[in-house]
Image (cartoon, rainbow, N blue to C red):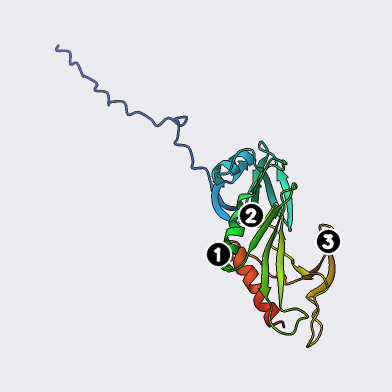
Amino acid sequence: MTEEVIAVTQSPQVPQPNATATRPPKPVPTVEIVVNGKKVSVPKHVTGAQIKSAAGVPADFDLFRVHNRKEIPVANDEQLTVTKGEKFIASPTLDPSFLEHPMQAAAADSVRDTFPDHTIDVEQSGDGTAIITVRDVSIGEGWDRPAIDLEVKLQVTFPSTPPYPFYGPAGMTRTSGPALVQIQPFVPLDGQQRTQISLNKPFDPAAETLGARFAAVVRWLRSPR
């Protein structure tokens, strides 16, 4: 009897997917925030140091998170969860050797461009603030003087803290028309009396320069309403 040999052919093994194989990392979600008036993309979960690096500001600058018109300090190693459109300020460390805030310097340049025929004074202080003055600005009729030195005090957190209020010489009064609630003739400013000019409206540094805001105040003085 002939014995039949039946060959059993095995199917080739098909590699099974490895459930534990390394998968490509998911992209880190980013958020667009605003640092010193400029849009910057950062991870949603980010440190203070990473924000300064993404904004291209010096590492020794102080970082502030703007919330409800307040500036909250942020440490370099502090972990934050940021949201779209949040505002931050990176400003120089408050050191007496610091000479000029870059945002304030740019703002002063815009005032010089807007008032090329006037003397522009910039007075820096040791606390990081600066008073910018446009000399001998004509303010039109209806006032007790034809021209004034118009000034504003910029905070170290400018432009997050808007340029407000503006000031003229002490005792400014109207000689015609009704009294103006926006004018307070005697208020203190760094130990000296000034007239406060309170024209409070939103300030968007991406759309308006400090020079443009000065010009708007001058227009109002010439035609108050």
Residues at marks 2 and 1, CA–CA distance in whole angstroms = 14 Å
Q: What amino acid does circle 1 point to?
A: Asp
Q: Residues within 10 Å of mark 2 (few under 14, many from 20)?
A: many
At 49% across and 41% down in the image, what residue appears?
Answer: 26
Residue pointed to by mark 2 = 104
Question: Residue 88, how many percent across, how many down?
Answer: 64, 51
Pointer 1 local density, CA inside 10 Å: few below 14, some 14–19, many at least 20:
few
Q: Secondary structure at mark 3?
A: strand
Residue at 66% in and 36% down: 77
Query: Residue beneath label 1, please?
Result: 113
State the residue at coordinates (84%, 66%). 187
Give the residue at the far bottom of this rendering: 177
Q: Nearer the viewer, residue 204 or 222?
A: 222
User: Mark 1 or 3 closer to N-term?
Assistant: 1
Discs 2/1, front? 1
Is the N terminus in the top left, top right, bottom left or bottom right quadrant? top left
Residue at the location (72% across, 55% down)? Answer: 155
